[in-house]
Image (tube, rainbow, N blue to C red):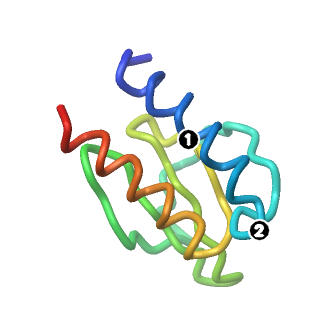
Amino acid sequence: MDKRIIVIVEMLEKWSKLMDKDLLMPNVPFPTAGGEVFWTDLAEIDGWRVQRNTVTGHCRLLDPENIRRAWGTYTGVMSLFGKVKAFNERR
């Protein structure tokens, strides 16, 4: 795994613990198929994507390797995505 992904994932784990009301369920990093069927991309930067489920409406954050790194409400996931974006812009 890319070193940058590891650093961002570690930061996301810390931030998600602070935001548990918007990230309703604990996340187990889980490989996905990239969301080609029930998911709509809402935002993307450097391979990191926010997707919304077309059936349930919940959102998730995928890393560049299509591993789910967080999921929950739009607000919670977009907040974490903002952290990823800020981290990437500093580099």
* Quarter placement of the C terminus: top left
Query: In the rendered structure, which disc, 2 or 1, sits on the residue that comes first in sequence?
Result: 1
The picture places residue 59, in percent across and down from the top left corner, at 59, 69
Q: Quadrant of residue 12?
A: top right
The picture places residue 65, in percent across and down from the top left corner, at 44, 35
Residue lying furthest front in this view?
A: 18
Mark 1 lies on a secondary structure that is helix
Q: Nearer the viewer, residue 39 or 24?
A: 24
The picture places residue 8, in percent across and down from the top left corner, at 45, 33
Q: Amino acid at mark 1?
A: Leu
Please tell me which residue is depicted at 81% across the width and 58% down the height of the picture: 25
Q: Quadrant of residue 14?
A: top right
Disc 1: which residue: 12
Q: Describe residue 62's horizontal placement relative to residue 23 as left or right.
A: left
Q: Amino acid at mark 2?
A: Lys
Which mark, residue 21? 2
